[in-house]
Amino acid sequence: MTVNYHTHTVRCRHASGSEREYIETAISRGLTILGFSDHSPYVFEGDYYSGFRMRPEELGDYCETLAALREEYRGKIDIKIGLEAEYYPKFFDAFLAMIEPYELDYLILGQHFLQNEIEGMYSAQLTSDPEHIKAFASQIIEGMRTGKFTFVAHPDVMPFRGDPEVYRREVSRICEASLELDIPLEINMLGLRDKRNYPTPEFWRVVAEYGCRVVAGCDAHSPDAVAEPGNIRETFEFAESMGITIDDSPLLLRKPT
């Protein structure tokens, strides 16, 4: 593994370690590109407070800190500055306006909620309702079609236990959009590391049939999770068992603004 674009910071309130520690770990483990993509701030209505993402007033410091480190480590590793964001249709225009002043390299689409986190369901909630997986797939596809996202993080995060044919149909829709729009899908290494409900074999078997481009993302919330050798081995073995070859080349990043 030589590139990773899925890395968090303490600003999301559930990660640990300094940016420098993530970078030094990445260098020691042979990465040539390290992309930071902390959970993005979002502009919500009323007094709602989101406890798992950085606040809007922290975005400037996030970008400035990483820009300074990018210069400091130039020639040793290439630092990219991005965000992991949901596609919340109701708030997306305000989100884009908020990030517009900052020179972000990319966004990754991590759809943690249906609709949005105020009104909708948590995407990782166990369900057998076909309407849930249909809505999840539709929202991911709508997000992909905005042209603002470079890849889709953990696209298999929803643990669906309903009709397998319904699941296959909705995964197929995601795969068709991935191919049409040339947007890769991520095998999430944190899911393997923490023994979560994803990666989901049924999802990735369909991806293999379609031949979508697949990347691996550390989803690192601590420095030790950056390109951890055992985690890399497990991830690439999982991909191989699904008939998938992980693309470890530098991504063509889509600037969001």
Image (spheres, rainbow, N blue to C red):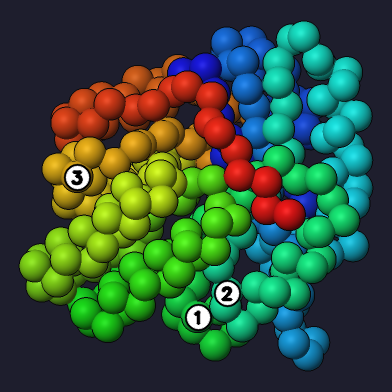
Q: Is residue 227 above or below residue 125?
A: above
Furthest-front residue in view? 180
Q: Which residue is mark 2?
A: 88
Three-letter residue code for mark 2 = Tyr
The residue closer to the viewer here, 40 or 172, is 172
Mark 2, secondary structure of its residue: loop
Going from N to C along the chain, the mark reached first, 3 or 1, is 1
Of the numbered discs 2 and 1, the one sitting upstream in the chain is: 2
Kindly identify which numbered label has been placed on residue 115.
1
Give residue 101's quadrant in the image: bottom right
The mark that comes first in sequence, 3 or 2, is: 2
**Residue 150 in the image, given as x and y percentages of width and height:** 54, 46
Left or right of residue 228: residue 186? left
Identify the residue under disc 3.
210
Quadrant for the C terminus, please.
Answer: bottom right
Answer left or right for 231 relative to 46.
left
Q: Position of residue 222 (x, y in %)?
A: 64, 36
